[in-house]
Image (tube, rainbow, N blue to C red):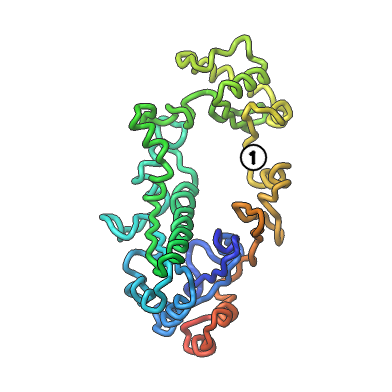
């Protein structure tokens, strides 16, 4: 989706009938690229994949290690038809190692990478952030970085290469700051015990009078002073660096913030440098003035979706075509990529047009 948003001509090869999790006209992750339904257990479909690889700059697969090779379109087979091809492999555990062939999901990968243990403010058990950290943060984002770097290198060398993007690798890399702090003795392996995980009262989430919440991130002294002033607790608030009185400060913040509604506090902090923001529901976020002004979240076809990111000064990214049913773009996409035997593929069942 990222590459398609930024202007790449991408097609998505799916199994006929789709898969259990994802796909179809409501899956925004598939926007911007037509769905081609191919039965990859048939040699005619594999031949088509190789023909497409011969025309492409990049091929991305998300199968378990060795599956693409068994099906006949592994890196060696693709390299034989296109030496400049960048071959991206997206997995949880990576292409090698004791767990490489094992099933898993985001929650498992970030567990083994050491990232899940410290998440959340509950000392008893960690809290997981849906599948944002592993699948999208440590996974696909690093895959895209790797693909783009490999494409640049291929322009110089004339040779493609395999990009092994493992969620465990990317998640560990995202955690570099914590690893550095741990080595320096400035980070503890406990939940809600560090600067950015709820261990200090001036970087936390507080409940308002109407059961909503404010996020408070007043780390720097000048921002902290603004926060305290606007909360009107200057005379009773402990010093920011007085760690022994942090529990007292947290209670003071909680009591004061719970005395007004979220909307009332938004009015108090609007336009200030107190580093305070409302915790918005997704649909509320789409209506926030800042998000509206930037077009960060847009409405299209009666639903809200994120706009392309990041922004460019000259080559403006645009939303691609909306998601479709699996196989809706089979004929159009294959023909546009120069496949001249689509009728034969459809007739023998190697491809499906819906």
The reply, left or right, for residue 352 in relation to residue 173 is right
Looking at this view, name the residue that lies furthest to the top: 235
In the picture, the quarter occupied by the N terminus is bottom right
In the current view of this chain or complex, which residue is farthest to the front?
Answer: 156
Instruction: Give percent across and percent down for residue 228.
Output: 62, 18
Nearest the viewer among 247 and 186 is: 186
Image location of residue 26, percent across then percent down: 60, 62
Task: Say which residue appears at 45% left-offset and 58% top-offset.
Answer: 149
Q: Position of residue 28 (x, y in %)?
A: 59, 60
Please tell me which residue is depicted at 37% across the width and 64% down the height of the picture.
Answer: 162
Where's the C terminus, which quadrant?
A: bottom right
**In which quarter of the view is residue 23 placed?**
bottom right
* Depth order, front residue of 15/98: 98
Q: Residue at x 65, y 28 (%)?
A: 273
Q: Position of residue 187 (x, y in %)?
A: 38, 29
318 up-or-down from 259: above or below: below
Judged from the image, the secondary structure of the residue bearing numbered disc 1 is: loop
């Amino acid at each position: 989706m990222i590459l398609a948003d930024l202007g790449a001509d991408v097609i998505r090869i799916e199994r006929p009938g789709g898969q259990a999790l994802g796909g179809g006209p409501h899956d925004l992750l598939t926007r911007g690229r037509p769905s081609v339904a191919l039965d990859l257990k048939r040699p005619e479909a594999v031949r088509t994949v190789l023909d497409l690889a011969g025309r492409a700059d990049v091929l991305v697969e998300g199968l378990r290690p060795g599956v693409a090779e068994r099906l006949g379109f592994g890196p060696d087979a693709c390299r034989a038809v296109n030496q400049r091809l960048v071959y991206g492999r997206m997995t949880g555990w990576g292409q090698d190692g004791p767990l490489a062939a094992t099933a898993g999901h985001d929650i498992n990968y970030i567990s083994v990478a050491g990232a899940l243990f410290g998440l959340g403010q509950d000392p008893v058990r960690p809290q997981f952030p849906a599948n944002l950290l592993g699948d999208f943060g440590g996974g696909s984002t690093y895959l895209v970085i790797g693909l783009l770097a490999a494409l640049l290198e291929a322009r110089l060398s004339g040779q493609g290469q395999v990009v092994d993007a493992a969620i465990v690798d990317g998640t560990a890399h995202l955690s570099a700051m914590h690893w550095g702090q741990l080595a320096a003795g400035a980070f503890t392996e406990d939940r809600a015990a560090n600067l950015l995980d709820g261990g200090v009262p001036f970087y936390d989430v507080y409940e308002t009078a109407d059961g909503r919440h404010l996020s408070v991130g007043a780390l720097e002294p000048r921002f902290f002073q603004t926060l305290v002033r606007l909360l009107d607790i200057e005379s009773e608030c402990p010093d920011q660096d007085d760690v022994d009185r942090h529990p007292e400060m947290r209670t003071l913040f909680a009591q004061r913030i719970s005395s007004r509604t979220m909307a009332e506090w938004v009015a108090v902090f609007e336009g200030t440098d107190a580093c305070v923001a409302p915790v918005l529901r997704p649909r509320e976020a789409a209506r926030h003035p800042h998000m509206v002004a930037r077009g960060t979240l847009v409405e299209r076809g009666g639903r809200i979706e994120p706009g392309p990111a990041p922004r460019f000064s000259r080559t403006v990214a645009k939303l691609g075509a909306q998601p479709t049913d699996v196989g809706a773009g089979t004929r159009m996409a294959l023909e546009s990529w120069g496949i001249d035997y689509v009728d034969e593929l459809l007739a023998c069942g190697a491809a499906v047009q819906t």
